[in-house]
Amino acid sequence: MQLKHVMMNTAPTANDTFIHFGKISRIERNSLTVSLDENVHCESCRAKGTCGIADSGSKEVVVPKSKEAFSMNEPVAVVLKKETGLKAVFWAYLFPFVLVIATLWIASGFLQEWMAGLLSLLILGPYYLFLYLLKDVFTEAFKISILKV
């Protein structure tokens, strides 16, 4: 499937997807690394506060290799469903926040204030270890597509 190049670096489409343009920066056996172009349209986006793409000029995304052949520095489009982005925000930001607050609230009933605060921060270690151990599950759940431009 060919994607017609448009002038915008990121474009929401009618079918609830976001398209980020970039170039292939690394080719490995099972994956491709895409360096995303600087996004000049982030200033007008409503989700710029939660999107990691808006934070800096250049980002890299690792995408599973598709059936199509790609070459180094080839321009491509990375397609991400909006719902996938929302799930990622949930697991990366919202759930850890709720976990810390809930741990603080529960532990403050049994422990001293400083110990409850320390425990609520230390709970993030096992949480992120849990995410790391389930990285294959999350990789499968957060599919990112790549298209030639």
Image: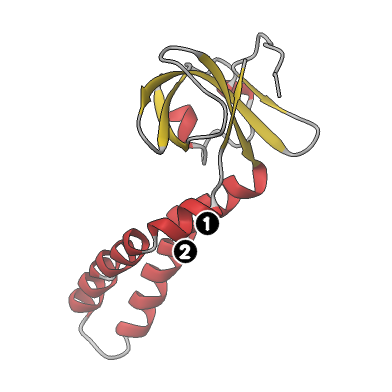
Instruction: Looking at this view, name the residue that lies furthest to the bottom.
Output: 110
The answer to the question of whether label 1 and label 2 lie on touching residues, with beta carbons closer than 8 A, is: yes
Figure check: 78 above or below 72: below
Label 1: element kind: helix
Numbered tag placed on residue 60 in the rendering = none
Q: Residues within 10 Å of mark 2 (few under 14, many from 20)?
A: few
Is 19 placed left or right of 115 in the picture? right
Q: Position of residue 25 (x, y in %)?
A: 38, 20
Q: Amino acid at mark 1?
A: Phe
Q: Position of residue 73 (x, y in %)?
A: 43, 12
Numbered tag placed on residue 95 in the rendering = 2
Figure check: 23 above or below 52: above
At horizontal 48% and vertical 35% (from top left) the residue drawn is 65
Figure check: 4 above or below 119: above
Q: Position of residue 145 (x, y in %)?
A: 59, 35
At horizontal 20% and vertical 70% (from top left) the residue drawn is 118
Q: Label 1: which residue? A: 90
At horizontal 55% and vertical 55% (from top left) the residue drawn is 141
Label 2: element kind: helix
Q: Amino acid at mark 2?
A: Phe
Marks counted in the figure total: 2
Give the position of the N terminus as an image quadrant.
top right
Colour scheme of the picture:
secondary structure
Q: Position of residue 5 (x, y in %)?
A: 67, 11
Q: CA distance from mark 1 to mark 2?
A: 6 Å
- N-terminal of the two: label 1 or label 2? 1
> Splitting the image into 4 quarters, where does residue 19 fall?
top right
Is 29 placed left or right of 46 in the picture? left
